[in-house]
Each structure stands twice: as structure tokens, then as C-alpha cells.
Image: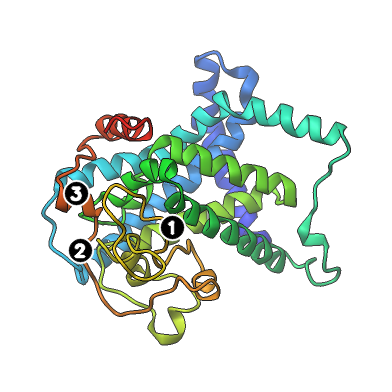
Amino acid sequence: MQWIEEVFAWAQQGLFESVIQPVMFAVGLGHLLEDGYVATGWLLVGLLQIAVLVAIIGPLQRWKPVEPMVDAAGVRTDMLYTLVHRLGLFRVALFFGVEPLFDELFGALRVAGFGTAHLDQVWAGVTDHAWISFLIYLVVFDFVDYWMHRGQHAFNWWWNLHSLHHSQQQMTMWSDNRNHLLDDLLRDCVLVVLGQLIGVGPGQFVAIVAIAQLSESLQHANIKLHFGRIGERLWISPRFHRLHHSIGLGHERNAAGDLVPQGRSPALGGHNFGVLLPWWDVLFGTANFELRYDPTGVRDQVESGREYGRGFWSQQWLGVLRLVGKA
């Protein structure tokens, strides 16, 4: 794992010194160079991810699509979401708006005697290996992510934000980041706190986020692809996750399999809530391994023509209105 870190550090240093640092000095942010270096790492990860999307996942979509492209404008909006998140603009906003609050919180906790768990040190001699340590953290993050996803469907107020993600009826590799910013803020805050509590290192945290985002981009891709009987139970495929987005099936049935009455959150059940690993869906009875590719979206779009917005800002504004019961 060391050579990967060395190559990445070399590229990060080069990008920072040649581009980011001069810009920071020019705009009067020279006192934040250390934070700018960290931000450069996130920018580099985002650029690499977009390169993978364009060079690998894009051709896969064209090779074996689930459905024809009929909503190019909707896809362009999803591309904007991806650029905002993957190129670090959302994280810059978090840095200036939220990180100072976290610094105060973690500082107060340490003064009060609450330290970090450091899960990678629990199993001496085994977790000393970087890959094993990394996998432990990845599994822990994914377990928490599974339950957060269940929460997004379990509470009406949270679903009012998260439903924006499900409103895309033309799913592509760009659809992963189609989220309400408040939804993303809440999820990221939980993951940052979790990372601090269990002692994940900055480099490991970046790697976990990068792998998760790339995998989720593939999951949302417009591609007729599954991983076979065994593979489907090891890692989440586009087929597995598409079923979660399927109208009236993946996220709109209660525990008995009945359609949830209109106006209520599809929170009582559903299928395939996992983010990376299908293990939690299997363990908690929410997995559905049917080999099918259904239309995606939210049922009230079809039944009552509920509007979720076409552009970035209209989608964000309607999400706020749904949250306060005005839309």
C-alpha cells in the first residue's frame, strides 16, 4: 500500500505547488496553506474518479444500457452534482461552515477524557498490516452507512430530503451525487464523527471515500450488469442497487410487501439499502437478488405528477419545501 501512497503524495504535492498554492497566495489565503494541501488531495481524488467515469464506466453504459437515453437535460444536472462533490466544492463549504464546530467538539471531548478508539489496534499482530486495517475501517463505515440509509427511508422528514436522490428516472453513472445538500451535510457529519471516534487516519479516510464513491457511481450506471450468484453477495452491483431505486419495489413497500399509502414515507421496509456490501441486507432481511431491471423514480411522480425540480437550484428549493411540508 505504501507505493500507492507515495505516488499519490507525489501527484498531490505537484498539483499543490504548481496550481493551488499560487492561487491561494493570489486571493489572500496564504495562511491556510496546510488546509489547501489537504483540499488538493480531495481535488486529485475527484479528478481521478471523473477520469475513471469517462474512460471506463461511460463506455460500459454505451455497451449494454438498461434503457435508452431520453432525458439528456436531467443527466446534465446530475453531472453538475458530481462536479460539485467530486471536485471538492462541497467539502470547501464544509470546511468554512462546519469544521470549526467539529474542532471545538472534539477538543472538548478530549479535554473531558474521551479519547479515540483506534480499532486498527484492537487485534495486535494482525491489524498491523495496512490492508487489514483499511478493510476493518471500510466494513465499519459501510455498516453505519447501511443504517443511515435505512434512516433516510425510515423518517418522513429525512425522506423528504432523500427522495430527491430517488426522483431520477434516467439513472446514469452521474446520479450518485444527486442529493439534497442538507442530506449530504447530515451524512458527512456522521461519517466525520465516526472517523474521529474509531481513529481512522486521514489517508485511510480519503481512500474509503474514494472507493465508496467510485463503486456507487458504477451502481447507478445505466448498465445491465450483475456479478453472478456469488459476486452479488460479496459486492453491490448495478442490478442490486437499481432494484432499490425501482418504483414501487425497492423503496416503497412495507414489511409485509404492500405498497405504502401515498403521502407516507416508504420507510417501513424496502430492499437493498447497502452502500458497498450486500451483507447487511442479507443479515437484516432486506436483500432482494431478483434478476430484473425496472423503471426508476418515486411513485408519486407517476401517480400524482409530484414535481421534484429539473435544475440544481429548483431541486434544492423543493427539497426545503418538502421538509417544511409546503410541497
Mark 3 secondary-structure assignment: helix
Q: Residue at x 55, y 13 (%)?
A: 28
Residue located 24% across and 59% down the image: 296
Q: Which residue is mark 3?
A: 301
Assess disc 3: are there few (<14), some (14-19) or many (≥20) residues with their C-alpha within 10 Å of its C-alpha: some
Q: Amino acid at mark 1?
A: Leu
Residue at 45% of width from left, 81% of height from top?
231
Please, is residue 323 above or below residue 235 in the view?
A: above
Q: Position of residue 116 (x, y in %)?
A: 80, 47
Furthest-bottom residue in this view: 229
**Which residue does the numbered mark 2 point to in the structure image?**
295
Q: CA distance from mark 1 to mark 3?
A: 28 Å
Q: Earlier in the sequence, mark 1 or mark 2?
A: 1
Mark whose residue sits in front, 3 or 2: 3
Viewer-side residue, 32 vs 101: 101
Quadrant hosting residue 319: top left
Element carrying mark 1: helix
- Please provide percent x and percent y for residue 283: 55, 74
Crowd class of label 1 (few under 14; some 14 to 19; many from 20; radius 10 Å): some
For label 2, the SS is loop
Report the residue marked by disc 1: 214
The amino acid at mark 3 is Gln
Whether 65 is drawn above or below 195: the answer is below
- The amino acid at mark 2 is Pro
Distance from disc 1 to disc 2, alpha carbons, whole Å, reads 23 Å
Front residue of 32/142: it is: 142
Q: Residue 106, position in %: x, y?
A: 75, 34
Question: Residue 226: image x %, image y %?
Answer: 34, 77
